[in-house]
Amino acid sequence: MSDKPEQLPVVTAEAKLADAGTAPTPDEPKSTRILREITTGSAAISVLAVVLALVIGGILIAVTDARVQATAGYFFSRPTDLLQAIGDSVGGAYSALFQGAIYNFRRPGFADGIKPLTETLTFATPLIAAGLGVALAFRVGLFNIGGRGQMLVAAAASGWVAFSFDLPFFIHMIVALIAGLVAGAVWGGVVGLLKARTGAHEVIVTIMLNYVAFYLISFLLRTPGALQAPGSNNPKTPGMKDTAVFPDLLGSGYNLHAGFIFAIAATVFVWYLLNRSSLGFKFRAVGENPNAARVAGINVNRIWITAMAMSGALIGLAGVSQVLGTVTTGFSSGIDAGIGFDAITVALLGRSRPVGVFIAGVLFGAFKAGGFSMQAAQGVPVDIVLVVQSLIVLFIAAPPLVRAVFRLPTPGVRKAPRAKKAVA
């Protein structure tokens, strides 16, 4: 049977609106219809989920502040003191978060002031790559939570090439990069193969492979002649050779490296794959309904294997960027730094769309970069940032709650026009 996708009937925008119960009517202004579509869309829900999480985070910051607690004791005699304390606490915390993640106005010169933004992009680089891998699996109807294992094996393969071989600059970097991508693809492809051949659930398999990868890499890091640095008793690799390390994008004064360029390229690739290629059409068809896709002549088992392999390669890129861009002096079994699980949050916030994942990755990179500044400047525990991230996931998973808080209309429901009063 031919692998060429069937020609689907053309569905107009008007038909889509009619199916959703929001077809335009003559008595509804066009501006009102556009506004309703914007406020009920998934992008609006994502933005409002972030806003709501920041508001609740501000409440937690105020409640745990010692000065706020002290002024609350005499609120009825001097209420303005409490309000000022709350403003100073929340405003100072989020101001420090901004200055640690975007731009620090206290530093002299633009070059020093913009350094926090480069730190944000550095933190965002592996989050974007891993988030794209998780999002790609989501679009095929698969739940890839094996990011930790795929990052570890990719980091091990890439790092081994980076410190074991003597190759010319750029060639060494590309070979190490390819080794990491292949290792991540193989580790992810195993999940797709087991699902296709045996029906094993990808969630269970990826969880188990996370443990397999962790203990395997831990063993290799303690084995002389494998990954362990020669003459060392610590479970750590040697430093990466300079010919394999990602070059700095803005000079030695900044940590931003060429891995960010690869993250941008990966975003463009995934966007083109899903929206402009025949393979992407098959991915989306299988994700919507694998049974219907099978009837249409699509080899669903092959799509599962291919999608998980590509997902593993993208997550492997996150591991490579850690080894060749951030931890170039050698790495241990904690090289994944929880990025494999944070990628699930990034993919959810980005609605599994490449551009959305990219923006979500930058946002979470800003949280990571600014969280430390917030803790150092205001004494706010960095755990508050983790609470905000968790709340974002909660609100993303509960759109009706966000709509109820902001009093947004429900998708597919249009308010009936008011009846005109009869003129006597």
Image: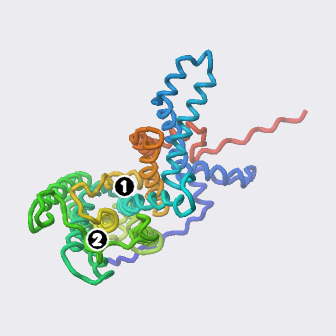
Q: Is residue 121 above or below residue 273?
A: above
Q: Point out which mark residue 281 bears.
A: none
Residue 404 x %, y %: 55, 37
Residues under numbered marks 1 and 2 in contact, where contact means CB atoms less than 8 Å apart: no
Local secondary structure at mark 1? helix
Q: Quadrant of residue 394?
A: top left
Badge 1: residue crowd in 10 Å (few <14, some 14–19, many ≥20): many
Residue nearer the viewer, 319 or 276: 319
Looking at the image, can residue 151 be seen?
Answer: yes
Q: Is residue 224 above or below residue 368?
A: below
Quadrant assignment for the N terminus: bottom left
Question: Which residue is pictured at 26% across the width and 68% down the height?
Answer: 185
Question: Which residue is pictured at 57% across the width and 43% down the height?
Answer: 410
Q: Is residue 11 above or below residue 57?
A: below
Residue nearer the viewer, 192 or 332: 332
Question: Which residue is pictured at 52% across the width and 55% down the height?
Answer: 102
> Is tag 1's residue or tag 2's residue first in the polypeptide sequence?
2
Residue 70 x %, y %: 50, 22
Q: Quadrant of residue 418?
A: top right
Residue nearer the viewer, 113 or 51: 113
Q: Which residue is mark 1?
A: 343
Q: Which residue lies most toward the left here?
A: 224
Residue 8 x %, y %: 48, 70
Q: Which residue is mark 2?
A: 181
Quadrant assignment for the C terminus: top right
Left or right, 100 with respect to 331, comes to right
